């Protein structure tokens, strides 16, 4: 059930993705500024029931990080569509986090418009800016997304990365994962593209109605798993979910921060399995 790395050529670039397991397809969509490696603590248990795919989107992890690429949420969603076409996926569940939440929202919006060549069967969202009015980006994120971003990115090193992660996480990551996350971020000119990637913060404001509407009119089972101690997208996002999506479940994780899949993988797995069990019972 190991996570084997594969390469997908895409518009002259190399996309790297992990694939493994058996059963119905499940896409694991990572957040900013990390990669598909974030899902490894959940991988063995999920792979026993699903065929898993964890793509490093362009600009992240082991995939290419072209300086001139148009890093928009739509472009990242396009990469998942390319993966579906290349691997023959026809039905897939989504489990997303952070930046990946917005990519999943875009995919749901496309499904609503009849534009996907495959069918999303369900979607679960971990901490992330699902509702921009309830999201509180870090000051460093706001600065990197601004005019001084390219200069600041040059001087953003591992120590600052670790401090930022310590601010948003309530529990330690598995041994060695913070170092691996930094290596994945910095490799292949990763710091250079960070300001461009952070354009998603403004995109969330600009496309709010589309992406929140994709949740409100999803047409498939959806749920939220929230690490409540996350200062970016914790309690405020969970509360807003309940206001706007009262019929969709929220699983609250006290004492957990922004990266539940790394901080509390067993609790995330229990919540996800509770959600899927509820779907099976309702069918």
Image (cartoon, grey):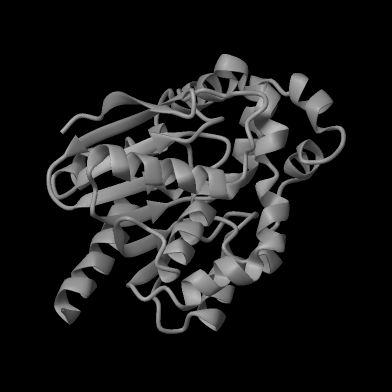
Q: Return the x and y of residue 136 as percentages of the image width and height.
A: 70, 57
Relative placement, left or right, of 41 versus 244 is left
The residue at the point 58 percent across, 54 percent down is: 230
Residue 218, by quadrant, is bottom left
- Name the residue nearer the viewer: 184 or 150: 150
- Please name the residue shown 48% across and 29% down the image: 11
Closest to the observer, 282 or 163: 282
**Quadrant assignment for the N terminus:** top left
Q: Position of residue 120 (x, y in %)?
A: 32, 61
Q: Where in the figure is residue 159, as x and y percent of width and height?
A: 67, 22
Q: Quadrant of the C terminus?
A: bottom left
**In the foreground, 36 or 212:** 212
Q: In the figure, residue 39 lies in which quadrant?
A: top left
Q: Position of residue 64 (x, y in %)?
A: 51, 23
**Within the image, what quadrant is residue 82 found in?**
top left
Observer able to see residue 122: yes
Query: In this figure, what is the number of numbered marks?
Result: 0
Q: State whether residue 185 is above or below residue 135.
A: above
| Residue sitting farthest toward the top | 188
- Residue sitting nearer the eye, 212 or 272: 212
Answer whether residue 256 is visible to the viewer in this image.
Answer: no
Taking the spot 48% from the left edge, 65% from the top edge, the residue there is: 109
Lateral position of residue 15 relative to residue 241, left or right: left
């Amino acid at each position: 059930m190991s996570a084997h790395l594969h390469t997908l050529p895409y518009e002259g670039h190399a996309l790297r993705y992990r694939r493994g397991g058996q059963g119905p397809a499940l896409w694991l969509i990572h957040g900013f500024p990390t990669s598909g490696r974030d899902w490894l603590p959940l991988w063995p248990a999920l792979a026993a029931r699903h065929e898993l795919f964890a793509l490093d989107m362009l600009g992240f992890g082991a995939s290419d990080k072209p300086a001139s690429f148009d890093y928009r949420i739509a472009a990242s969603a396009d990469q998942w569509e390319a993966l579906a076409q290349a691997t023959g996926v026809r039905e897939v569940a989504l489990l997303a986090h952070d930046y990946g939440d917005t990519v999943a929202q875009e995919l749901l919006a496309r499904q609503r418009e009849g534009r996907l060549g495959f069918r999303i069967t369900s979607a679960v969202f971990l901490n992330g800016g699902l509702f921009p009015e309830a999201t509180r980006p870090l000051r460093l994120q706001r600065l990197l997304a601004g005019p001084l971003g390219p200069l600041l990115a040059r001087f953003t090193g591992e120590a600052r990365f670790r401090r930022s992660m310590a601010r948003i996480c309530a529990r330690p990551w598995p041994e060695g994962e913070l170092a691996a996350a930094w290596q994945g971020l910095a490799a292949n000119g990763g710091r250079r593209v960070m300001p461009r990637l952070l354009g998603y913060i403004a995109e969330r404001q600009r496309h709010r109605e589309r992406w929140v509407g994709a949740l409100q009119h999803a047409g498939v089972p959806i749920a939220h798993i929230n690490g409540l101690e996350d200062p970016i997208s914790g309690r405020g996002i969970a509360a807003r979910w309940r206001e706007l999506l009262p019929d969709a479940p929220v699983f609250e994780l006290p004492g957990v921060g922004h990266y539940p899949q790394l901080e509390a993988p067993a609790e995330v797995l229990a919540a996800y399995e509770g959600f899927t069990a509820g779907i099976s019972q309702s069918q």
